[in-house]
Amino acid sequence: MSEPDSHSPPGPTPLPAGTPATGLFLIDKPTGPTSHDIVQQVRRWTGVRRVGHSGTLDPMATGLLPVFVGRGTRLIEYLSDHQKRYSATIRLGVRTDTDDAEGATIAEAPVPTLTLAQIDAALAPFRGAISQTPPAFSAVKVGGVTAHRAARRGQPVEITPRNVTIHELAVIDWQSPLLALTMTVSTGTYVRAIARDLGEHLGCGGHVVEMRRTGIGPVDVDEAHAPEALDAAFAAQRGWDLATPIVRFFEHWPRVIPSASQRGQLLNGQALATSLGGQTSTHALAVDRLGVPIAVLVPEPGWPERWRPAKVLIGG
């Protein structure tokens, strides 16, 4: 695992007149760059400083990385409600300090002879609601310090276990010592921790050698673009043509199109009176007539037909 490049990237290209300052790019991250590297690249492409991603992918991992631009970054926190999908290959019989192939080997042991049925049975304790300890080399904060930074300095790292949910965990192939899996998990789940803990459960150790995020909520990696494609598109002045509507991740929320006066209410933090067509939800989205998000709405306590803005995406 590598640290982000410490050298400052070139400043962003000035934003052409008329270019949208809010958007979402679905990127198919290749092996090598960090998630932060991808964010820096999007800053250079768009000329916008306010850029953020949802769900860190390790440098060796590939797959879907949603990158939000401008005021769209205010919606990142709501993606935590979505389940994430991965495919991964685990190498049993070898433990590494990072729980993936980029780390140093710290232990080796023979892999027991196991049938496919025995492998599936060994996975049973990892399905459903479980307690999981994130890897020492991770972005988790411990005493205000990122765990992987402390681990690289050789400092002891004690990470508190967290509750996660493994909704699905299926064997795709088993050719000892390599185990290929697919899984659907809650936000905060570490695939590397599953490899580590499964290896410990089998008494031989294990680590991830390949990992790909195949989807988040309603979005599949097939909808994403390779960085090379985006680079070429921005060079041709059509990069924003490859942006994805931000509402793609929030299609399960009811929507309301506020009037001009209601938009003013939202900007002033005032609640709207709307029944949302009788739909019930913990959140709703106020959008303009083109479907562009204006604000995230939440129900006013005790007033089922009044919705107040939790996040406003227009104005100052």
Image: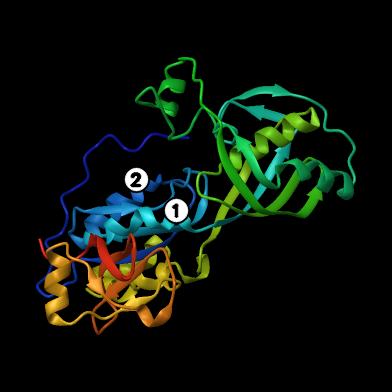
Image position of 236 (left or right of 154): left
Dot 2 falls on a residue whose secondary structure is: helix
Give the numbered dot on residue 80.
1
Mark 1, other Cα within 10 Å: few <14 / some 14–19 / many ≥20: some
Q: Amino acid at mark 2?
A: His
* Residue 34, percent from left and from top: 40, 44
81 or 116: nearer the viewer? 81
Q: Quadrant of residue 266?
A: bottom left
Image position of 286 (left or right of 110): left
Give the numbered dot on residue 147.
none
Q: Which residue is mark 2?
A: 36
The answer to whether 304 is drawn above or below residue 170 in the figure is: below
State how the image is colored: rainbow
Q: Quadrant of residue 14?
A: bottom left
Residue at 60 percent of width and 39 percent of height: 192
* Residue 18, percent from left and from top: 12, 75
* Residue 30, percent from left and from top: 47, 54
Mark 2, other Cα within 10 Å: few <14 / some 14–19 / many ≥20: some
Residue lying farthest to the front in this orientation: 302
The answer to whether 246 is drawn above or below residue 106 in the figure is: below
Q: Quadrant of residue 16?
A: bottom left
